[in-house]
Amino acid sequence: MTDSDIRALTPGPRKALMAKRDAYQQASGAMTIDEVADHHVDLVLGSLHTDPELIASALAAVRAT
């Protein structure tokens, strides 16, 4: 998700996404590529107000590939 994408969000979703992004960026230790993918799927779908169960399904599908 780019800064332009984030700026396009309304204030509430933008603030929530930035909080998630900040937490992700401050994660301690190295992350695997799968962990990075999980975070990106969660960030993008969460910013779109996707149902949490659908996000979980998407994450499971990403992990299965």
Image (cartoon, rainbow, N blue to C red):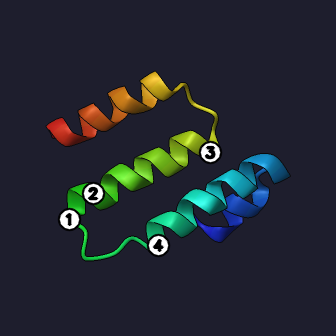
Q: How far apart in space, not on screen, are marks 2 and 3 (Cα)?
A: 18 Å
Q: Nearer the viewer, mark 4 or mark 3?
A: 4
Quadrant placement of the N terminus? bottom right
The disc at residue 25 is: 4
What's the residue at 37%, 30% (across, down)?
A: 56
Which quadrant of the view contains residue 53? Answer: top left
Q: Is residue 10 visible?
A: no
Query: What x and y, as percent, mark residue 46?
Result: 56, 41
Name the N-terminal-most of marks 4 and 3.
Answer: 4
Is 40 situated left or right of 31 in this image? right
For mark 4, does the 10 Å Cα neighbourhood hold few (<14), some (14 to 19), or many (20 or more) residues? few
For mark 1, does the 10 Å Cα neighbourhood hold few (<14), some (14 to 19), or many (20 or more) residues? few
Element under disc 4: helix
**Mark 2 in CB contact with mark 3 (< 8 angstroms):** no
Q: Taking 47 as reference, is 20 above or below it?
A: below
Q: To which residue does mark 2 refer? A: 35
Element under disc 1: loop
Name the N-terminal-most of marks 2 and 4.
Answer: 4
Is 33 situated left or right of 56 in this image? left
Name the N-terminal-most of marks 1 and 4.
Answer: 4
The disc at residue 32 is: 1
Query: What x and y, as percent, mark residue 62?
Result: 26, 40
Element under disc 3: helix
